[in-house]
Amino acid sequence: MVVDGIADETGDAVGRLFHALADATRRDILRRCVRGELSVSRLAAAYPMSFAAVQKHVTVLERAGLVTKERRGREQLVRTDPDAVGRARQALDDLESAWRARVDRMSGLLTEDADATGDADAPAPAQNTTKGPDR
Amino acid sequence: MVVDGIADETGDAVGRLFHALADATRRDILRRCVRGELSVSRLAAAYPMSFAAVQKHVTVLERAGLVTKERRGREQLVRTDPDAVGRARQALDDLESAWRARVDRMSGLLTEDADATGDADAPAPAQNTTKGPDR
DNA sequence: CTAACGTACAACCAAATGGTTGTAGATGGA
DNA sequence: TCCATCTACAACCATTTGGTTGTACGTTAG
């Protein structure tokens, strides 16, 4: 088993990424910090919740690799990591490319191996060729 | 416009989307279904958990708009909605474009006022309305 | 008709989340 | 120096989440 991601949640970076993005407050923090680095207390002042709560949100974002913290004096500046967005997009690309591969098989009129019974299949989705029916 | 989720607080489609994608089992279900529609019981047989648990995962995916269910006899076929991946990508694009906008401002040497009422899905904009970062 | 299958849903439980308060350690300014 | 600020973290609480079992209902095969 252990198809691809399942099983080990400890190292599930993709899971942490999407989990962090699933909260509206955290997405807003990202947008604020993308406009310029802000201290945690500065951020906290912008939300109707305690400093500690915002601090936890920042920690979640940090563990997901979406932001980095940098000390400046007694403040801690938070700033988003632009590459992180790219990492999230990559995870989506994996899903989409799988879909595209299926469409290719269909349009190619190839045999449709709809096994999918047990796990352990994953016949190496060979490079999808051409034809990006990209919505 | 329609920067992000805005409007429906409870609805928060983007939140549901990312939340659904944050679970490894659900991402795996997506990958399986993207290769061809499967009945729920067929899916359930592939995971070391109960049928009901898988059924719940499918419900989460469905409410996030990532899959659709279609009846065929006594079975319920699950199939991924390719457009959903595009919707998730769009949400990421919003974040990235914000970052890009900032870079543009920097390179353009424009004044850096953090007005931008485009706060979108922030939860109850506290008291801090508009600029004037008091305190 | 009857039995087996596939689904739906309710009730329940343990663990994780999102929030609170409180306490304590550094740092900078008067 | 003393004090205000900013941060970190622990303890606690309410709600959600992910999982279980059990029951009920429609559909198809014998």
Image (cartoon, coloured by chain):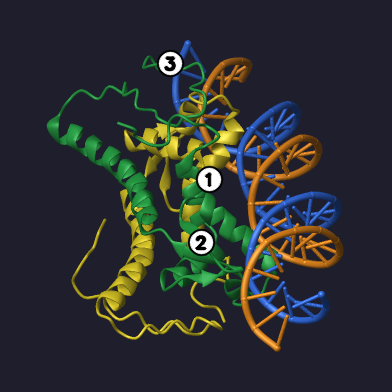
Chain colours: A yellow, B green, C blue, D orange
Instruction: State the SS at label 2.
Output: strand
**Neighbourhood count class around disc 1 (C-alpha, 10 Å): few under 14, some 14–19, many 20 upward:** some
Q: Which mark is residue A59?
A: 1
Q: Which chain letter matches label 2?
A: B
Q: Is residue A66 visible to the viewer in this orientation of the structure?
A: yes
What amino acid is found at the position of numbered circle 2 in the picture? Answer: Glu
Could you tell me residue B128's position as x and y percent? Answer: 46, 17
Relative height, residue B38 to residue D16 (above, below): below
Pick the front one: B74 or A16: B74
Pick the front one: C22 or B29: B29
Task: Give the residue displayed 51% in from the left and 20% down from the top.
Answer: B126
* Residue under numbered circle 2: B70
What amino acid is found at the position of numbered circle 1 in the picture? Answer: Thr
What amino acid is found at the position of numbered circle 3 in the picture? Answer: Thr
Relative height, residue B9 to residue A83 (above, below): above
Please tell me if label 1 and label 2 are on a single chain. Answer: no
Q: Which chain letter matches label 1?
A: A
Task: Give the residue displayed 60% in from the left and 34% down from the top.
Answer: A52
Left or right: where B5 falls relative to B10: left
Q: Estimate the spatial distance between the alpha carbons at disc 1 and disc 3, rounded to whole Å.
A: 25 Å
Pick the front one: A84 or B124: B124
* Residue under numbered circle 3: B129
